[in-house]
Amino acid sequence: MGKPTQVTNNIRALRFAAGEMTQADLADRVGLTRQTIIAIEQGRYSPSLEVAFRIARVFGVPLERVFAYPEVEP
Amino acid sequence: MPFEEKVTWVNAVVTVLAASWYAWTVGGRLGQLPVTEIAYQRPLLFAVGAMIVLTIAGTIAMAIGTAIRAEVTGEGSVDDIDRKDERDAHIDARGDRVAFYVSSALMVGVLAMAMLEWQHFWIANGVFAAFVAGGLTSSAVKLAAYRRGF
């Protein structure tokens, strides 16, 4: 349960940069629940590639600006 | 709390209530009568029916309560109260998969009971127990995933 994901994200920073968009607003725009947005932000859930692209599209940035994966696996 | 987590709570509570009522009703007769004379059929069917009806009613009541709360507090919108996303689907699948293993293992035991020609009472109750255990396992796995992360 709760496998730690190595995928990190900048969603929180991007939300604030986008006029302090709320988690609920982002959830509405990508069709997720607010709890899933929270889980993604906290690194407790890795979204599907499709959802990752939808999130990046909301902020108008490339996927790599939203999500990152370590160059070297620990 | 996601809508699907609330639905899982409704399922878990209803299952515990119905199974407890059945165990109290029928289990109390175990020491007093031979199992061949215990009229378990009606209580068993009633318990299964109650699980179905109460789960539907509980889910409807919970949805209405969630909508009212969203309107009153302004947190969330009525439109998204029953939203189900990919994380919910993954958690749902994990819970059902683990529950399938539990129910299947118990059903093997019931199969053995049937082959050894146990009384119908034990076979019927073994099936019911496997059904209840599977349902509770599914709920427990899902709630753990929602609470501890997925």
Image: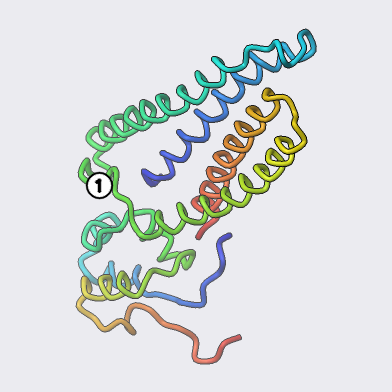
Q: Residue at x 47, y 55 (%)?
A: B93
The single residue placed furthest to the bottom in the displayed view is A72
Q: In the image shown, does A33 or B128 lie closer to the viewer?
A: B128
Which of the 4 image quarters holds residue B81?
top left
Q: Secondary structure at mark 1?
A: helix
Q: Amino acid at mark 1?
A: Asp
Q: Chain of mark 1?
A: B
| Picture layout, residue B106 above or below residue B53 | below
Q: In the image shown, does B125 or A66 lie closer to the viewer?
A: B125
| Picture layout, residue B62 above or below residue A30 | above
The single residue placed furthest to the top in the displayed view is B32
* Residue A55 x/y as whole percent: 27, 70
Q: Which residue is mark 1?
A: B80
* Residue A31 x/y as whole percent: 25, 59
* Residue A35 x/y as whole percent: 38, 54
Quadrant of the frame with the N terminus of chain B: top left
Residue B144 horizontal side relative to residue B61, left or right? right
Mark 1 crowdedness (10 Å alpha carbons): few <14, some 14-19, many ≥20 = some
The single residue placed furthest to the right in the displayed view is B31
Q: Residue at x 33, y 27 (%)?
A: B61
| Picture layout, residue B81 above or below residue B125 | below
| Picture layout, residue A37 above or below residue B125 | below
Q: Residue at x 40, y 75 (%)?
A: A9
Residue B71 horizontal side relative to residue B21, left or right? left
Which of the 4 image quarters holds residue B28?
top right
